[in-house]
Amino acid sequence: MSLYQVTDGVAVITLDRPPLNTLGLPLRRHLDNALFAAQSDSQVNAIVLKGAGRGFSAGGDITEFDQPDNDQEPSPRALHDHIEASHKPVVAALHGMALGGGLELALACHARVAHCATQVGLPEVHLGLVPGAGGTQRLPRLTGPEKALNMILSGRTFRADTLAGSGLFDAVTTDDVEAQAITLAATLATAGTISRTGKRPCNMDNAQAFFAYTRSTLRLQPGASTAPLDCVDCVEAATLKSFHRGQEQESNTFRNLRNSPQFEGLRHVFLAERKALTPPGKAQQVKPLPLNTTAVIGGGTMGTGIAMAMANAGIPVVLVERDDTALARALTTIRDHYEGSAKRGKLSAEKAAANTALISGATDYSAVSDCDLIIEAVFEDIAVKCQVFERLDAIAKPEAILATNTSMLDVNRIAQFTRRPQSVVGLHFFSPAHIMKLLEIVQGDLTSAKVMATVLTLGKKIGKTSVVSGVCEGFIGNRMLQPYLMQAGMLLDEGALPQQIDSAMEKWGMAMGPFRMCDMAGNDLGGKIREQHLSNHPQLVYSRCFIEVEAMGRFGQKVGRGWYDYIPGQRAPVPSEEVNSAVIAESARLGLQRRFISDEEIVGRLSLALVNEGARILEEGIAQRASDIDVVYTAGYGFPTWRGGPMFQAQQRGLVDVLTTMSRFANGPTYQKADDFWSPAPLLSRLAASGESLFNVQAPEAV
Ligand code: NAD
């Protein structure tokens, strides 16, 4: 491949490394060589950088970060300095996306032309990093420090046209970006003017107050990555130091963060989320079906949320309810939600109205006969599901996908209510469905490859983090939650109080401890799940405290009382005397001498309860990979992303240590009935003995 093509004295250098033009070493070398060649080519007066395929560049190659720096030449920073120092003008032509290192490359050019729909952003903070190739020094010089810092701290992507007047681009166009970039490059060459970003001043009025205020707004969890604060420091350095000194600070900060355990965890989850999108088995080879029209059956808590998740992505939905009253209630919930969002400025009034209009209502199932995808979200009752799926089977077009949002019921059994079990799949959304990121895609024994490929594509389109699960009680997430809650109950019986357990877990990084989480989900709902679980596994031990809290009518936040009391208008839970007394009384009833339990023991027992069940799930092939389990817990259950997920944690500490600790718990002062709780998953014992990693376990071929 030639290094560049010359058009009218302009060398066009193409970033061509499918699928996303990741700026790993091979592409950086190519760019560096092409730049040298173009600079010494007498036919060339100016240079344009453009991306081949879907975009300019999605950024650096984070799998490369483990290698020693001196094997990485040219480093991104050296390449960018080379571009900026060029005596021939270099213009970036941006389309598709210019993210992270891709945007930093563009910032080093002397001018930028972007197609209006280009997605741009610096997402490094989500990985526990600062932009490390000049981003914190060049962006503030182009847009001003405030705008730059907001972009960097949010880690968000922005459409180029929303940044049109920001100073980031020299032109934003709906036309041919490459042609405009060539014209601009030629004009700059003729004028003999080159604007080097690093040479621009970076001034700001009241800079000190601005940076102090921004620091005060950052809420960093103890132990979490310090990257947001480091981003502030680096952008502040752009206003205080020379470009060169600022770059030095940025590089050192980047290197320190890159070597931190927080980055390890965040990178693991970043890569795991992408891996989870790989369709299982044959689904990799098939083309997804089109999904133009969808329907949701049942307009309760979940149905309304699912309908809004679809509408938010521009997908029309028909919402079907049992009768006019239920339908009116569901549509009012939706309208109120969008109107409220518009009032709070979260959505423009036009977008709110457009989303509302995408959701129509019906009480007659014939309204869904032509839909490509129908998602059932009716009561969690197998008889009701049976009725609904028989009706859908009779009315839906042959190629329609029939999905169930069941939390705990058997998707294979639901599929058998139809004559097309190959078209039935579980789409397990989490509440509230239009907000929560996680989507468990439950693959039945007979679900076809085409259906799997299609719903994985849908997950992406509606902005969810999707993970495929096999069929089992509670799928990946809720199944692991049961031993976690059982262990939390044992801790209560042995001597801890709910607030102590929650506080230990939250200090460790969980978004919410187990009892706050139960209060949010509803203790009546939790009770139903527990009863079902116990009916299948009568040998299991749950603390009676769960039953008592439910029997007291303490159903959780929705009634203002649960494991905690909730004062109207206040979010913070208040420890309940009534609950705490009941907990202490239960220990006495069991004849247990309550003891002091350390935070370390709480965290150890709860996190290893997750790991042991996770290993069983992996061994049974319910999860395709250990990293999928980590995605479920970080995206859906508030597990701290910077810890990488329960399985990553287990592998980091070593499986031998995991087994030793579990055996210590089994032999510790826990009560007798729970002893076999800690019998290790066979997979853990096997891997600990062989020294293999959880992350090399291959699930049996599916579909
Ligand atoms: P819900 O009680 O709030 O809503 C169910 C709705 O279905 C009601 O509005 C009801 O009128 C309607 N309905 C019942 N039978 C119907 C029929 N034959 N045709 C049309 N509509 C009918 O329940 P929910 O919390 O939204 O749960 C729905 C499903 O989602 C359940 O299977 C549940 O297990 C699952 N789920 C719930 C949660 C959660 O947190 N609530 C989370 C994930 C999954």
Image (tube, rainbow, N blue to C red):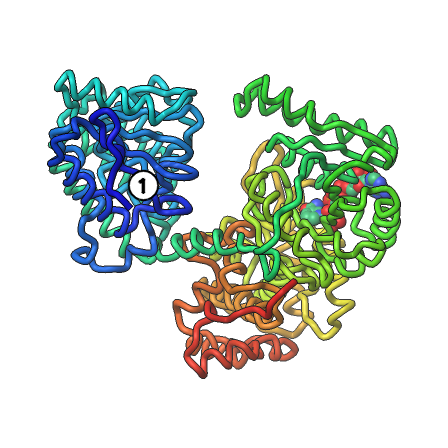
Depth check: give the residue in front, 252 or 490: 252
Residue type highlighted by circle 1: Leu
Question: What residue is rendered at 68% in x and 70% in y?
Answer: 541
Depth check: give the residue in front, 506 or 325: 325
**Residue 578 visible (yes or no):** yes
Depth check: give the residue in front, 172 or 431: 172
Quadrant position of ligand 1: top right
Which image quadrant for residue 447? bottom right
Question: What residue is rendered at 71% in x and 53% in y?
Answer: 425
**Residue 77 visible (yes or no):** no
597 to 159, vertically: above or below? below
506 to 591, vertically: above or below? above
Disc 1 target residue: 15
For label 1, the SS is strand
Horizontal and vertical percent position of residue 4: 25, 38
Apparent side of residue 256 relative to residue 655 in the rendered image (left or right): left
Horizontal and vertical percent position of residue 155: 38, 37
Horizontal and vertical percent position of residue 95: 39, 31
18 to 44, vertically: above or below? below
170 to 320, vertically: above or below? above
Residue found at the very far bottom of the displayed protein: 689
Question: What residue is rendered at 30% in x and 41% in y?
Answer: 101
**Is the CB–ligand 1 distance for label 1 below 8 Å?**
no
Horizontal and vertical percent position of residue 268: 41, 57
Which image quadrant for residue 689? bottom left
Question: What residue is rendered at 55% in x and 52% in y?
Answer: 637
Apparent side of residue 597 relative to residue 4 in the rendered image (left or right): right
**Can you say which quadrant of the picture contains the C terminus?**
bottom right
Q: Residues within 10 Å of mark 1 (few under 14, many from 20)?
A: many
Apparent side of residue 240 relative to residue 398 in the rendered image (left or right): left
